[in-house]
Image: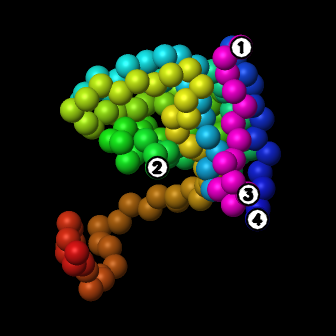
Amino acid sequence: MQRVKVRIKLLCPEAKMPFYGSEEAAGFDLYSVEDVTIKAGETKIIKTGISLEIQEGYCFQVWDRSGLGAKGIHRFAGLGDSDYRGEYKIVLYNSTQKDYEIKKGDRIAQIVPVPIVRAEFEQTDELNETSRGDGGFHSTGK
């Protein structure tokens, strides 16, 4: 398994070092450093109390924890660039009809380090033809 060094700065006493839940886990867990209620249908920004550093050529993708996703709590805004040094805050959305309580120390998201491939843009008047063409939603079947 490929590895990349991630440097972590704890920003407050409540902050926890991330860790992998199992030997083959793709993502490492992040924790809340605050008690927060996310009301039904509401979006909240949750502090983790950590800053992360990863080498150039990589980014962090933030993903739902499956246990929270199953309860209707989902993350938004899930990408951290290699040049960002601020606190990682997780944007959570409560898609349910009930308020949801986040407590200090709760695992709220997971992060996967991912290599980056940069696009080289070339403006053109025509694109190559494909069998799909401009078919959008459900054009390839369900």
Q: How far apart are marks 3 and 1 (CA)?
A: 27 Å
Name the residue at 20% across, 66% down: 137
**Which circle's residue, 3 or 1, is located before the other in the chain?**
1
Residue 53 visible (yes or no): yes
> Mark 4 — residue?
1
Query: In the rendered structure, which segment of residues is drawn in magenta?
Result: 13-25
Residue hosting label 1: 13
- What's the amino acid at mark 3? Glu
Label ID, residue 70: none
Amino acid bearing label 2: Ser
Residue 75, relative to residue 41: is it above or below? below
Which numbered disc, 1 or 4, marks the residue that appears first in the sequence?
4
- Residue at which label 2 appears: 66
Q: Nearer the viewer, mark 4 or mark 2?
A: 2
- Mark 3 and mark 4 lie on one chain; the one further toward the N terminus is 4
Q: How is the image coloured?
A: rainbow
**Callout 4 amino acid:** Met
Query: How much space separates mark 4 and mark 2, taking CA atoms?
Result: 23 Å
Q: Residues within 10 Å of mark 1 (few under 14, many from 20)?
A: few
**How far apart are the alpha carbons under marks 1 and 4?**
32 Å
Instruction: Tell me the amino acid under the disc marked 1.
Output: Pro
Picture coordinates of residue 44, whole percent (x, y): 38, 24
